[in-house]
C-alpha cells in the first residue's frame, strides 16, 4: 500500500529522471545509517540528499541532523513536498547574479553556497 509520502517521492523521482539526474532510493536494512534521506541524487556533479515530506510535516530530529551533515560536507540537502523540492531543484539549475558573483541558491539551506565555475547549472529555456 502506498503512503501519502510515497506520492511525493514519485513526483520528485519523475522530475529528477526528466532532467537527467542520477538518483536512487536507499534501502535501509539492519546495518544502515538511521536518518538517511529518502532520495540520493547526483545533479551536475553535486551530491543531493532529498527528504520527502507531506505538507505540514517536518523532518525528524535524526533526519534533520543527516541533512545538516550533508550540507556541512558540501552537499545539497533538501526536504519538503514534491512541489517545494522541485522548485528548489529548478532554482539550483540556474545561477542568480548577485554582486557579480555566480551563486547557487536554495531555500532549504540557510546559507548560500558560492561556486567559482561558470554555467554548469542552467535552466532550460521554455519550448526547447
Image (tube, rainbow, N blue to C red):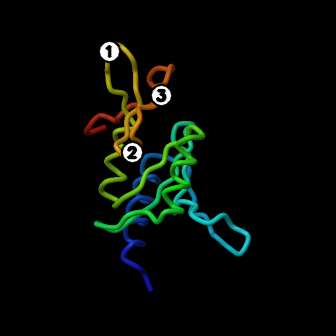
Q: Which of marks 1 and 2 is in front?
A: 1
Residue pushed farthest front?
61
Residue highlighted by disc 2: 89
Extreme-bottom residue of the structure: 1
| Mark closest to the chain's N terminus, 1 or 2 | 2
Q: Give residue 84's quadrant in the image.
A: bottom left
Q: In this view, does 55 lie above or below 112?
A: below
Q: In which quarter of the image is residue 92?
A: top left
As helix, strand or loop, the secondary structure at mark 3 comes to loop
Residues 3 and 121: in front is: 3
Q: Is residue 18 left or right of residue 54?
A: right
- Distance in Å between CA atoms under marks 2 and 3: 14 Å
Q: Mark 3 points at which residue?
A: 120
Residue furthest to the top: 100
Category of crowding for the residue at label 1, using alpha-carbon neighbours closer than 10 angstroms: few (below 14), some (14–19), many (at least 20): few
Q: Residue at the spot x=46%, y=31% of the render? A: 113
| Relative horizontal placement of residue 38, taking residue 59 as reference (left or right) | right
Residue for point 42% across, 51% down: 18
Indicate which disc, 2 or 3, sits on the residue closer to the N terminus: 2
- The residue nearer to you, when weighing 28 against 41, is 28
Alpha-carbon span between mark 3 and mark 1? 19 Å
Label 3 near label 2: C-beta < 8 Å? no
Q: Where is mark 1, residue-wise? A: 99
Amino acid at each position: 500500500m502506498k503512503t501519502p509520502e510515497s506520492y511525493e517521492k514519485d513526483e520528485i523521482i519523475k522530475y529528477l529522471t526528466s532532467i537527467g539526474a542520477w538518483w536512487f532510493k536507499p534501502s535501509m536494512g539492519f546495518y544502515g545509517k538511521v536518518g538517511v534521506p529518502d532520495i540520493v541524487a547526483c545533479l551536475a556533479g553535486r551530491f543531493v540528499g532529498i527528504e520527502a515530506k507531506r505538507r505540514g510535516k517536518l523532518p525528524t530530529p535524526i533526519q534533520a541532523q543527516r541533512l545538516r551533515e550533508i550540507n556541512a560536507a558540501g552537499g545539497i540537502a533538501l526536504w519538503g513536498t514534491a512541489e517545494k523540492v522541485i522548485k528548489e531543484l529548478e532554482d539550483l539549475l540556474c545561477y542568480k547574479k548577485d554582486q557579480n558573483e555566480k551563486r547557487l541558491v536554495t531555500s532549504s539551506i540557510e546559507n548560500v553556497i558560492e561556486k567559482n565555475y561558470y554555467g554548469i547549472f542552467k535552466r532550460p529555456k521554455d519550448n526547447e
